[in-house]
Image: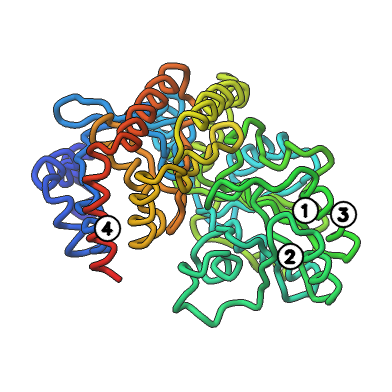
Amino acid sequence: MTTAESAPESSRAAEFDLGRLLAERGAERYELHTRYLNHQLPRMLHTIGFDKVYERAEGAYFYDADGNDYLDMLAGFGVMGLGRHHPVIRKALHDVLDASLADLTRFDCQPLPGLLAEKLLAHSPHLNRVFFGNSGTEAVEGALKFARFVTGRPRILYCAHAFHGLTTGSLSVNGESAFRDGFAPLLPDTAVPLGDLDALERELRKGDVAALIVEPIQGKGVLEAPPGYLLAAQELLHRHKALLIADEVQTGLGRTGDFYGYQHEDGVEPDLVCVAKALSGGYVPVGATLGKDWIFKKVYSSMDRVLVHSASFGSNAQAMAAGLAVLSVMENEQIVAGVRATGERLRSRLAALTDRYEMLADVRGRGLMIGIEFGRPKSLKLRSRWTMLQAARKGLFAQMVVVPLLQRHRILTQVSGDHLEVIKLIPPLIIGEREVDRFVDAFTAVMDDAHDGGLVWDFGKTLVKQAVAHR
């Protein structure tokens, strides 16, 4: 027996003390990122004043060392669907660790993946099987592979301004050139305008299209597919023997007020559905590609092909336990119904402000996925300031609103994409009337200041200088 094997478990655990490490080195967080990770991230955070130090988090709030609370209206870009550190999910993870399961043997069938697949498919009655990976982009990659294989066709259609991930396959169906630039050659895929059925049919007539991948609501800009588009697209695709892939990585699991975003339109039954983000409970990365039985049976057509598509950490016990706990909480706490009610309250109160503020152009979205768009004002004084910002860099006004929301009102939000005058709200699905009131009151105060020419514009001058300096 080795020394390590003979040592008591308590003494082995004492060899690594996470609490002590954080106490000793936690203050170096921004320096460590600058030195070893993406050095532009701390630079950006320092520039816009987002370089906060959060000590802990719970539910829809962060807390600093002085106990000040910060309302989270970003939810880690949708990952924290049930907020941070939900007690049911925490307990599930403690339980699965304490169970010491024989996980990832690669040559057995553990119960948790099957149980989670069963639960997910109960919300997707027209689908039959699930592949579990580790992220949203991986779920998309799986869907692209499956569609190409079962149709025998090379090309995927996607919508302009779409975002489906940043690995090479999903980047090929990313509708934003800023993400694609410098990474060519990518796969031979083609963009079509969201909602344009004629453009879709023109591409389908070429006979080489495997599938259309679409977000029911695009995360970039919070742009919703027009009413009837998904059903009509589905019919066109099937007529041309192509598939419909719904990317529900951000819109799925209750975000839009239904379990999936595509369920807002009767009759839509995608051939493949991608989910991730909120399924993790905010703890363990997980992604899932759901599909029809015939698709999976064609991909995995024989024992020789049993591992033709797999993932080293796919279906791991911790991720499966987190996913099961998330779905249990959603059912027991009636999350979807709550999202529908809270989302309508938030959206309607914000929409009522469009007549009050010249620069507030539109409020749109579904459930708790809301876009606040700003536009060119009519009055000469405000228009000159707006023009100054636009000349430096489109999107600066939205950033001017985001910063005082955090600095003065302790509310975390962010713009919905580069060069867009849109703020996207995707808070934890558990927020209620108190959080709606706090956000609307803070947003009103910031907009009052912006229209009165107050401190917001002082920060705007700083942003202009930064934009011009980095051209």
Front disc: 3 or 1: 3
> Which residue is found at the position 62% from the left and 39% from the top?
116
Which residue is labeled 1 in the image?
271
Q: Earlier in the sequence, mark 3 or mark 2?
A: 2
- Residue 438: x and y in percent read 37, 22
Which amino acid type is shown beneath numbered disc 3?
Glu
Q: Secondary structure at mark 2?
A: helix
Q: Nearer the viewer, residue 275 or 461?
A: 461
Tell me what residue is drawn at x 69 percent, y 56 percent: 194
Q: CA distance from mark 2 to mark 1?
A: 9 Å
Mark 2 and mark 4 lie on one chain; the one further toward the N terminus is 2
User: Is residue 201 shown above or below 154?
Assistant: above
- In space, the residues marked 1 and 4 are separated at their CA atoms by 46 Å
Residue at the image position 15 percent from the left and 46 percent from the top: 15
**Mark 2 near mark 1, Cβ–Cβ under 8 Å?**
yes
* Mark carried by residue 147: 2
**Mark 3, residue position:** 235
Residue under label 4: 464
